[in-house]
Amino acid sequence: MNVENQDVLLDLEGEEEEEEDDDNDDGETVLELNQVVIPTYGTVPDQQNLHTPEWVDFDDRTDSLFFKDGQRRIDFVLVYEDESKKMTHKRSDRKKQKRKRQVYESNLINNGLHLEATRSVHFILSRVEYATKNNVKKFGINKLLDTGIYKAAFPLHDSSFRHPSSDPNCPSERYLLYREWAHPKNIFKLQPLDFIRKYYGEKIGIYFAWLGFYTNMLTVAAVVGVGCFLYGCLTKDNCTWSQEVCDPNIGGNIIMCPQCDKVCTYWNLNITCESSKKLCIFDSFGTLVFAVFMGIWVTFFLEFWKRRQAELEYEWDTVEFLEQEEQVRPEYEARCTHVVMNEITQQEEHVPYTACGKCVRMTFCTSAIFFWILLIIASVVGIIVYRLSVFLVFSAKLSQHISGTEAIRKYLTPQTATSVTASLISFVVIMILNIIYEKVAILITDFELPRTQTDYENSLTTKMFLFQFVNYYSSCFYIAFFKGKFVGHPGSPVYWLGKYRNEECDPGGCLLELTTQLAIIVGGKAIWNNIQEVLLPLVKNLIGRYSAAARSEKVVARWEHDYHLQPIGKLGLFYEYLEMVIQFGFVTLFVASFPLAPLLALINNMLEIRLDAWKLTTQFRRMVPQKAQDIGAWQPILQGIAILAVVTNAMIIAFTSDMIPRLVYYWSFSVPPYGSHSSHTMKGYINSTLSVFNISDFKNASKPLSPWFGNQVTCRYRDLRYPPGHQHQYEHNIYYWHVIAAKLAFIIVMEHVIYFVKFIISYAIPDVSQKTKSKVKREKYLTQKLLHENDLKGVKKNMGKIADKIIKEADSTFRHKDE
């Protein structure tokens, strides 16, 4: 049966249908027979020496998973385009492609596979040769796919996801997975992990097990985060410093100094009233509680996941799955041209490069990684320059004075406009850089030439996460720890690149801006990923089905249905893990500024589980099942994020939030000897944290062009410095040094307390539960007992033979004597 009059499907079967437990086995026992290869691209072996598959016609059994005889089950499907109908290549090129394909199919048959071809395993497929060039072997289905000799290679789904199979000999596991797992109505149901593992293999199963476990743990974090957010909402009206900002007699009478050179003008403090009210929600005592809680929560999450992972290892029989058992990548084998002596076996073995060659490769790859990270940092610098330059424009265009009829100006301040536009541009740049860095990371990893697929994925995981970490988090780190920290004072401002004056934070700090940045990136990333992962495959499949239906018969085979689905890609679930780990970083690293992050992550993940399930079950071809013992390199990455999260949150509270300066003022500087209040209070905090500057001390380069209004000769700016006329004017005052000491003390205490609690928790919670340990010990006991009993049976059997022989010889001797 013709597929668009061009495609040919090649179905492979290796003996009869295997037992269920062997479905996910990567290894194969292959009968090594003589293979035919093309010595060069110009010489072709005799056509009579080639084994060709048997051609059959499609019998209209749309749900059949068997060969023509109805007994041999189809394991794999290869798709190629008839070379005689290709018009886009030269005739000689088409002939070469056909020869390579014929040789490859002949060698598959020589290796014991059954082939059946019709017009419309995986170990052997990836290692059978088809040509040699310059003494280098060309082999493997992946290479044939990359060069276009084959268009697709995939195992079959067992049925339609919409209805059970009409063939009684075919199972309908795909239909059951869709109905009980992938359907949107199952969003609150537990996942059938054993069933997922049976159909897709351990690698897919452990991903969904981890994602489900992570989502369940997020429930606790989301509840506490919402509680902290509600606490901030309920207490914002009691926020004294915000009330002072909004008070027309306090904030309305405070004239702030310009925040940029020349074009910026003087402004009233009370225009930041609305932002100060919002800041009270996030910059509250609940933020500190939540940051400490999340530092402990992440430890519980990682420790309990280790226990769950150990249970899955035992239940899915992957405890003994070691690296030595994993097959070498075909790409590695193809380049094994150097001979070395194995230190363990003392035998010669082939490797793709010498020790010097490996050193050169590692040096080149490290340099390339470093270069691309610097390029990401350069893009961040570009965003900073944008912020500095556009702030000048907004400061000149947006009015710095508000009136009751112009409510929008309460929100549209130069700082807010700059922050929102810069966050949007940063998000777009991040998405574009991601596309580039994916290809770069893959190229670097391919050049490294890792030995096994696990090595390959771990190496690529490290690179991609490093790129993504810098790409996604760099702008957040800038806002949290650099913006507004090194600005000098109006009389002596600090300049970026010698040209742009460093931007300042609002009088309430940069915490609200960090919250805005996180909300835009997290929300935008979730929307973008859903479009990219769900909508695009759906549209492509609809277009493919519509085009195929217009040119082919109404009744098509199962392999043709699956051919029009989307390929899963060589990296499988790599991007799914990467997406979730980046989200995990946002949830933990900056949670002190955004307590609603766990709630957003929880909602997203509940949808993500079902969307990933729906996508795998309905929109993608079936993956080749693979074994996996754990989540691989993602485990140490998660642990590294958990350790770093404690530091970042402590520093956000200390340096980005205004909590420490407020506490220092409340306990020390609101009462004598530094303050004038009779009891501890927050009244006067704003006036205490705004320094005074004499406008006559402006330099010509930074003096504002706009005229001064009023009779005042001073303006205020956010800092802790001595006023003009003081013997140490414009130098940091005693309040500043008290605050610095308190911040450093807070970071040290918070880090040590949380790390100590984390250590206790990690020590108290074993990686393997006692129940699982008992099961493993019981299994080992039964194994040893069985081996011991078999040995005893063997000894008894041998002893019995010896005893019979002795008795027989003795009887013969007695008879001889009697005679």
Image: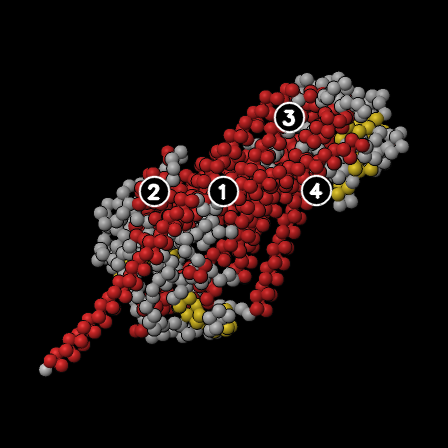
How far is mark 4 from mark 1, CA to CA? 48 Å
- In the displayed structure, 387 sits above or below 468; it is above
**Label pair 2/1, CB-CB below 8 angstroms:** no
Picture quarter with the N terminus: bottom left
**Type of amino acid at the residue the image marks with label 1:** Ile
Q: Earlier in the sequence, mark 3 or mark 4?
A: 3
How far is mark 3 from mark 2, CA to CA? 48 Å
Query: Would you identify the image quadrant in which residue 728 lies?
Result: top right
Crowding at dot 1, Cα within 10 Å, few <14 / some 14-19 / many 20+, comes out as some
Q: Earlier in the sequence, mark 4 or mark 1?
A: 4
Q: Marks 2 and 1: which is nearer the front?
A: 1
- For residue 280, which numbered disc appears in the image? 3
Q: Marks 3 and 2: which is nearer the front?
A: 3
Q: Earlier in the sequence, mark 2 or mark 4?
A: 2
Q: Marks 3 and 4: which is nearer the front?
A: 3
How far is mark 1 from mark 3, CA to CA? 38 Å
Residue beneath label 4, please? 385
Picture quarter with the C terminus: bottom left
How far is mark 2 from mark 1, CA to CA? 34 Å
**Type of amino acid at the residue the image marks with label 2:** Leu
Identity of the residue drawn at 89% across and 32% down:
727
Residue beneath label 1, please? 765
Identity of the residue drawn at 28% across and 45% down:
172
Crowding at dot 3, Cα within 10 Å, few <14 / some 14-19 / many 20+, comes out as many
Can residue 475 be seen at all in this image of the molecule? no
- For residue 177, which numbered disc appears in the image? 2
**Type of amino acid at the residue the image marks with label 4:** Val
Query: Would you identify the image quadrant in which residue 619 lies?
Result: top left
Q: Position of residue 353 (x, y in %)?
A: 54, 68
Identity of the residue drawn at 63% across and 44% down:
474
